[in-house]
Image: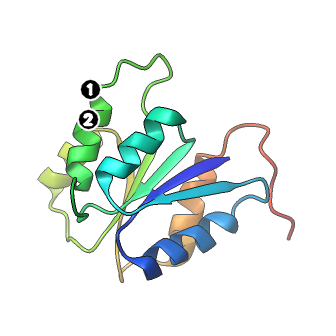
Amino acid sequence: MYILILEDDDSNRSLFRLQAEEVDFEIEVEVAWNGRDGLARMARRRPDLVVMDLGMPVLDGIGVLERISEWDDPQGAPPIVIVTARDLSPGESARLRSLGMTHAFQKGRYDTQMLVDAIAAHRPRGAGRKAS
């Protein structure tokens, strides 16, 4: 499983990586600190899952979602999990879902197991499971 993490905060990137590694022993995690770098990485290799913040420098998460939604990719967009400090309104959540977001979590207000479960829900069939 290949996961791309787009997050500008070092400690959050490390936390998201640890949570992803709880899901799968055959995992590859790559990180980008801004949306433009993340899109460039996605152009080189399509991730199985993207975990990203909305508030990033250079190109924010909404900009990333807008650009991904414009792609002409027969596989479609990868699943996208948002982890943000913003308290999303129902209207914002609906717009983000229309752009491809699959899950949203508010930093400091979610149980880490919720993110682990969201990542596991998108594990490709046949991918190895982490030994207990």
Kindly tell me whether residue 78 is visible in this rendering.
Answer: no
Q: Which residue is mark 1?
A: 70
Above or below residue 122? Residue 83 is below
The C terminus, quarter of image: bottom right
Indicate the position of residue 103 as horizontal and vertical percent values: 40, 54
Camera-side residue of 47 and 95: 47
Above or below residue 101? Residue 73 is above
Looking at the rendering, which quadrant does residue 61 occupy? bottom left
Marks 2 and 1, how far apart at CA:
5 Å
Indicate the position of residue 95 as horizontal and vertical percent values: 18, 44
Above or below residue 76? Residue 93 is below
Q: Secondary structure at mark 2?
A: helix
Query: Residue at (22%, 63%) from the top-left corner?
Result: 57
Looking at the rendering, which quadrant does residue 56 occupy? bottom left
Camera-side residue of 132 and 10: 10
Q: Which residue is mark 2?
A: 67
Relative placement, left or right, of 102 versus 96 is right
Indicate the position of residue 49 as horizontal and vertical percent values: 52, 46
Looking at the rendering, which quadrant does residue 85 occupy? bottom left
